[in-house]
Amino acid sequence: KFGDPTAKSERVYDWELGGNFRQKNFTAGVNLYWMEFRNEIIPYGGIDDNGVAITVNADRSVHAGVELTSSYKLYKYINFSGNFAYNYNRIKDYTGGIDVYLPDWSSYRLPVNYKDKKIAGFPDYLANLMVNYNDTHWQATMRLRMIGKQYMGLCNIDSLAIDPYTVASVSASYKLENFFKVGNVTFMLRINNLFDKKYRTSGYSWTYGTADGVNQPVSLIHEAEYFVAAERTFYGQLKMEFF
């Protein structure tokens, strides 16, 4: 790429309103937010010759939504908790372009207005559900993580989007106190992607066009590549705390 390699500085105006409710065994919270961006650096689609994602400055964009949190202690050692966020991520003012190639391999730039398009890589919703057991020696946690639909490019092509997915993980640890009068020993095991789900985590797409001439109808071609998630993985840890 020739020319100025820098991006414009971002500016954001952030308005938030929230509240929390607390009882002995129950808490709940809600937060509303509206973030007005000027010159937000967003993924444009594709990667450059160095494998780096191509980004641009959007003149105006908005991130808004609602965030919910809650926890409930069912028993002395058992706690349920969760959070949910519904997100509105839109471009409000940005005109870009798509390269259109002619039969002689020359090209021209077709202007495209991306107003009200969803910003690539931002899911519609995020949620977590957790169950935790914790006593003097044992601690165990199970977590469900839910990710909403993600578009891979500013053209918002449904067939290239990452579908919503849910993954689970579990962890457990056991603590031996005053082990041989030397210190505390903790054994820990964690399993990610418990059910060995095959899914995509992120990616990028690009769009180009073809035409028979400068003033002829343009056919758009949309393509994408993805980063896949790891399969079921195991982690073990042995920790020694000396007195």
Image: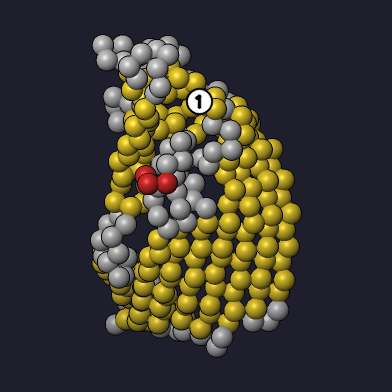
* In the image: residue 90, left or right of residue 56: right
Which residue is at 54% across, 31% downward? 114
How far from the left and from the top, in percent, is residue 241? 36, 70
Q: Quadrant of the N terminus?
A: top left
Which residue is at 30% across, 47% downward? 227
Up-down: is 164 above or below 56? below
Q: Secondary structure at mark 1?
A: strand
How far from the left and from the top, in percent, is residue 41? 52, 31
Which residue is at 30% across, 31% downward? 51
The answer to whether one can see residue 237 in this image is no
Up-down: is 116 above or below 162? above
Q: Quadrant of residue 223?
A: top left
Circle 1: is it few (<14), some (14-19), or many (20+) Cα within 10 Å?
few
Q: Identify residue type, mark 1.
A: Val
Please name whichever residue, 82 or 197, is drawn nearer the observer in this view of the structure: 197
Q: Quadrant of the C terminus?
A: bottom left
Q: Residue furthest bottom?
A: 75
Q: Quadrant of residue 69?
A: bottom right
How far from the left and from the top, in percent, is residue 218? 39, 23
The answer to whether one can see residue 20 in this image is yes
Up-down: is 4 above or below 170? above
Which residue is at 68% across, 46% downward? 34
Residue linked to disc 1: 112
How far from the left and from the top, in percent, is residue 14? 69, 42
* In the image: residue 35, left or right of residue 55: right
